[in-house]
Amino acid sequence: MTGTIQKNHASIFGTTLNQETYQHLYQQSIEQPELFWAQQAERFITWFKTWHAVNASDFNKGEIKWFQNAKLNVCYNCVDRHLPVKALQPAIFWEGDNANRRQTITYQMLYERVCRFANVLKSLGISKGDRVCLYLPMIPEAVIAMLACARIGAIHSVVFAGFSPHALAERITDAGCKYVITADEAIRGAKSVPLKKNVDEALLQAKVRKVIVIKNSGASIPMLLPRDVWYHEISRQASLECEPEWMDAEDPLFILYTSGSTGKPKGVVHTSGGYLLYAAMTHRFAFDYQPQDVYWCTADIGWITGHSYGVYGPLANAATTVMYEGVLTAPDPSLVWKIVDRYQISIFYTAPTAIRSLMAFGDSPLSKSKRDSLRILGTVGEPINPEAWRWYHDKVGHGKCWIVDTWWQTETGGVMLAPFPKVGNQKPGAACLPFFGIKPIIVDEQGKEVEKTQKGFLTISQSWPGQVRTIYGNPVRFFKGYFVQYPGKYFTGDGAYQDQEGDYWITGRVDDVINVAGHRLGTAEIESALVLHPAVAEAAVIGIPHAVKGESVYAFVTLVEKQIWQDSLVGELQKEVANMIGKLAVPENIECAPKLPKTRSGKIMRRILRCIVTGELDKIGDVSTLAEPEVLEQLISAHQAKIKS
Ligand code: PRX
């Protein structure tokens, strides 16, 4: 292969974001997108070979292609290229679950540890294009393993460590992973999570060649030979040098499973060039990232936020990041703010659920820290209520930090809408403005653009480099899921409106996806788990408002003939969901329904169920499509009887 490493032409810090520069760059990005993205690609990324075409995407075919034929290595961009000037700068301050488990990892150390890991992967036969499943706690090896995969061109599929063995097996099989990287256990305060045991259980249903086990808690665990290998043993002789594999910009970087409104979780595929550019650029601009900043994104690497803003975006920009192993609120709700002081964190990015649970402890945990290093406070994953926004702004940030409420999705790769620092307005709960190159269009059911202030469906009318490329192994589901509803546009699945000033507000999902504590869950997946129980005939799951989690899972079940409802079924059904998906999806409430409200075509009218539970009977609206109108009365009286009991 021919090519040379291209030097970046301009510093990524050349632009100071303000109202004027935002307007200018936004306009350019929409009017001359090819020129805009080419310039940014040269600025943010070090390429081994340049591209033939900037953007060859076609929404009408569901084809997304950026920087075709260009070559780069994502790991090289996140590590190697920083070494000449930043070798000794901390890349990761790792805060373990207790003070004895702290580590500072410089870029030089990161380089060596990633190369060693990459050599181990190669020695086990892993090569370009192989899928590798990561089921890991928030330990440095999680980031190192991701980067090591990227270095040799293997495609990682990180599965959140809270998923059950069954859910893990499903994801391993769907992606055709032949290798799993895990740890003996995850440490969560007084508790531990038996990761290797979960993997063993998953692998009764899915077959792989090798399981690489990282020693974390030190618990004694059974190893199945020759399948299982200890990382600390196999890595002893591994070299600290490993040539990066030069990848095509459109070669997949990772698969990440997320929930859809129907069927099984979908493997969102992101590729190398466009994704990295978008993650790096949005990290730089959404958080006004500056070289002296210390940055902490609290998201677990099992979610897209952990990928884009815990790993790839900040490391591509040579940032110093903080990584935390434990639980944000336990055992001590002041701990998170003490970490802010310890590392003098200036940019802090978390989820509204975390803010609300910290707020629930009152202001006294705040008094044990100063937090005067903070400059930017970000939120992501779900709508933030004004009360939480104000507490974050007034109390956590002493009223002097910009609150960046970022709206985006696993599929978008990076931030799409946000109140960018020093640009535009600050409104509690508003996602405000589009990022460069993002053209949101709010449409009605027929696809016609709605007037300002009117609610509609949020679509994006032109491609951006961080856009999902496909659903792994299922291009038809990809096309049908995002491009057929409004031809020529990407459909987000969210509702939105623009206020009089043009700022965007997200009104929530308009499909059968719910958002519990910032975790995206498909109602269909939970329903499938519930109906596995022999007593259950049918199930309908809804999300209902919850003070801390945003939404909680509420399930209605109908029983098979002759089955009588017993309260013990609640626990049994909760266990079924925990086994099939994980504790994160367990319904808080399960109610026995006489029948489910269905349309004549058999679709469950979840809207009706939601209104019954929230008591907003006046909002039930049109029920003329109900196949059996009498079901409504029956459901209302059954629910009222349940409340009374
Ligand atoms: O409904 C939106 C909500 O989370 C969905 C995307 O979930 P996921 O793919 O898991 O990615 C979460 C992290 C990027 C969106 O369709 N959502 C995300 N951010 C916000 C939000 N809703 C309101 N405000 C946000 N800032």
Image (cartoon, rainbow, N blue to C red):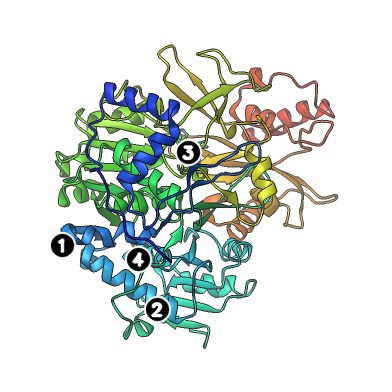
* Residue 533 x, y percent position in the rendering: 72, 57
Q: Which mark is residue 19?
A: none
Quarter of image, res 76: bottom left
* Residue denoted by label 4: 144
Looking at numbered disc 4 in the image, what kind of residue is underneath it? Ile
Q: What residue type is disc 2 on?
A: Val
Q: Is residue 235 left or right of residue 290?
A: right
Q: CA distance from mark 2 to mark 4?
A: 12 Å
Q: CA distance from mark 3 to mark 1?
A: 34 Å
Are the residues at dot 2 and dot 4 in contact (C-beta closer than 8 Å)? no
- As displayed, is residue 16 above or below residue 238? above
- Helix, strand or loop under label 4: helix
Residue 148 seen anywhere in this rendered image of the structure: yes
User: On the picture, is 594 further left or further right than 158?
Assistant: right
Q: Is residue 205 above or below residue 432?
A: below
Identify the mark nearer the N-term, 2 or 4.
Answer: 2
Please state, as top left, top right, bottom left or bottom right, where the C terminus lies in the image: top right
Residue 357 seen anywhere in this rendered image of the structure: no
Cα–Cα gap, marks 3 and 2: 35 Å
Disc ID at residue 88: 1
Q: Which image quadrant: the N terminus? A: bottom left
Distance (Cα) linking label 4 and label 3: 28 Å
Q: Are marks 3 and 1 in contact (CB under 8 Å)?
A: no
Label 3 Cα neighbours within 10 Å, binned few <14 / some 14-19 / many ≥20: many
Which residue in the structure is indicated by mark 3?
464
Assign a secondary structure to mark 3. loop
Q: Position of residue 210 (x, y in %)?
A: 52, 79
From the image, state whether disc 3 or disc 2 is nearer to you.
Answer: 3
Residue 120: give its label: 2
Q: Is mark 4 within 8 Å of ligand 1?
A: no
